[in-house]
Image (cartoon, rainbow, N blue to C red):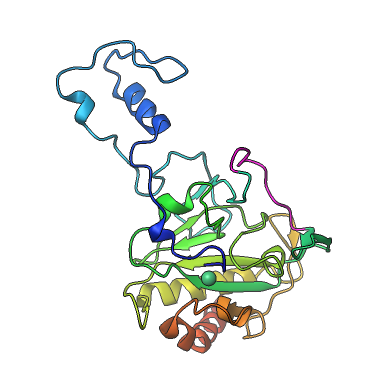
Amino acid sequence: MGGMEHSPAHEPSEPHPEHSRRRFLIAAGSGVVVTAAGMLLATLPEGRDETPPPVDPDNPRGLTEYEPVYERAVKGLEAPLGFEDCAHPTVRSTRDTAGSDHHAVTPIIDRFVIHHTGTTAEQLNFLSRCNKRSSAPTFYLRHDGSVIELIRPGAKPSSTGADWNWRSLAVETLDATGAPDYTVTDAQLEELAQMIAWLATFDGRTLDGVPVSFTIDRDHVISHRETWSGTECPGPYLQSRLDDIVARARVIFAAR
Ligand SMILES: [Zn+2]
């Protein structure tokens, strides 16, 4: 998580967003007529209006989906980048500016930055919207090792701070336990290594339109804490496993 992006679990959720409800009503195919503004014109069958809308756990907010660039990802979601301007959440931030002063840079991907969520509670709903903490990682990694690609790898994530987002891919790893260790599962450690090995195959080429300069070592694979001492992210456990993750990624890469 980013410095201004912590504690997503404390973000109040919106349990019944109007658009999700409307999608359900249409999908239900029960003759219900809904206007573009979402106003219900027909009366629902008895009790139907108390039924919660079905939610796809891999796309809880009904975002537009695309074939993920990372082939091991479950799916790609067109998540809105979470910048301050939530009124225009479809405007992507580009990789050609960096820093709080927005100075010009030549886009490159040369860092893989590991984060943790800081909570064990499912975060995909939070990360699927223009959230107040402006958190938009490239990948969201769950306990079973499944990955959701939240923004395209070519797009600039909003995870690690203005000096690092422009040059990095970022992964948010859902914690398996809370404080103080913030452990993650073996499946997550393995998937982190898989992601890193995959990124290394693009070294010297482009990934999703962005030049890549990336070798599998601890200069290129870093944690959030290593970019900014003001955060404990990704927690003591994951931090202690970074060398192991890199070693495993090298093995995977060599076998490709
Ligand atoms: Zn972080």
Residue 131 falls left or right of residue 154: left
Expressed as whole percent of the image width and height from the top left, the position of residue 152 reads 61, 53
Q: Which residue is painted at 63% across and 78% down in the image?
A: 227
Expressed as whole percent of the image width and height from the top left, the position of residue 93 reads 70, 51
Q: Is residue 148 above or below residue 185?
A: above
Q: Quadrant of the C terminus?
A: bottom right
The magenta stretch is 86-95
Q: Is residue 233 above or below residue 120?
A: below
Expressed as whole percent of the image width and height from the top left, the position of residue 216 reads 63, 81
In front here: 20 or 6?
6
Q: Is residue 219 above or below residue 37?
A: below
Residue 235 falls in image quadrant: bottom left
Residue 49 falls left or right of residue 230: left
Residue 32 falls in image quadrant: top left
In front here: 69 or 111?
111
Q: Main secondary structure of the magenta part?
A: loop
